[in-house]
Image (tube, rainbow, N blue to C red):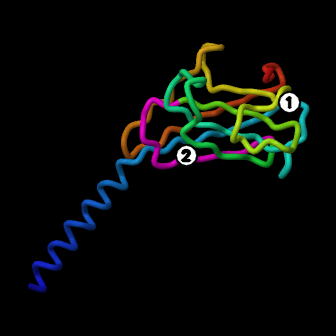
């Protein structure tokens, strides 16, 4: 009985490790070159989307930065390709649970503007991207 328990436990742990390795990770290096002050009250929000149709619903995940330059990491990304956008909160009152306030500086990960660039990452892999944005594109 003791050996059967060990074998079962070993198979369970092996399966759990294999499952953990199937998660996708997207690391986003963000640089904001706009004129706004980024701090604990005026954050940059980085959103992860599972579709290029970003108006069809809320993002899959949101992370924040409190400086003009930084990195956020989305782990256990369920669907690829994914898409990444940024929004700077000039008001200091936005919590990223609604559309960005009017005048917010917006960014999108793209190679051929204005189309969003898909971030394709395989199971157990990490994709690293750089997203730089400024005050050119603003929320209405």
Q: Between disc 1 and disc 2, whose residue precedes?
A: 1
Q: Quadrant of residue 49?
A: top right
Please state which of residues 45 and 57 is positioned toward the viewer in this rendering: 57
Answer few, some or many: residues within 10 Å of disc 2's Cα (few below 14, many 20 plus, some between 14 and 19): some
Real-space Cα separation, disc 1 to disc 2, in angstroms: 24 Å
**Overall secondary structure of the magenta section:** strand
The answer to whether residue 75 is magenta is: yes
Q: Is residue 138 above or below residue 68?
A: above
Give the number of callouts. Answer: 2
Q: Quadrant of residue 1?
A: bottom left
Which region shows up in magenta?
68-82
Query: Which quadrant, please, contains the C terminus?
Result: top right
Residue drawn at (56%, 30%) of the image: 57
Q: Is residue 130 left or right of residue 120?
A: right
Percent across and percent down for residue 7 are 14, 74
According to the picture, the residue beneath numbered tag 1 turns out to be 34
Percent across and percent down for residue 97 are 69, 41
Residue drawn at (74%, 33%) of the image: 87
């Amino acid at each position: 009985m003791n050996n059967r328990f060990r074998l079962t436990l070993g198979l369970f742990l092996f399966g759990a490790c294999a499952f953990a390795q199937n998660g996708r990770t997207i690391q986003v290096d963000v640089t904001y070159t706009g004129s706004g002050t980024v701090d604990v009250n005026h954050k940059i929000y980085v959103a992860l989307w599972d579709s290029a149709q970003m108006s069809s619903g809320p993002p899959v995940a949101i992370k924040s930065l409190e400086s003009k330059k930084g990195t956020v990491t989305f782990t256990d990304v369920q669907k690829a390709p994914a898409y990444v956008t940024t929004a700077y909160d000039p008001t200091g009152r936005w919590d990223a649970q609604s559309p960005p306030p009017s005048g917010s500086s917006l960014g999108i990960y793209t190679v051929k503007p204005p189309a969003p660039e898909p971030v394709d990452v395989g199971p157990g892999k990490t994709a690293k991207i750089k997203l730089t944005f400024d005050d050119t594109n603003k929320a209405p």
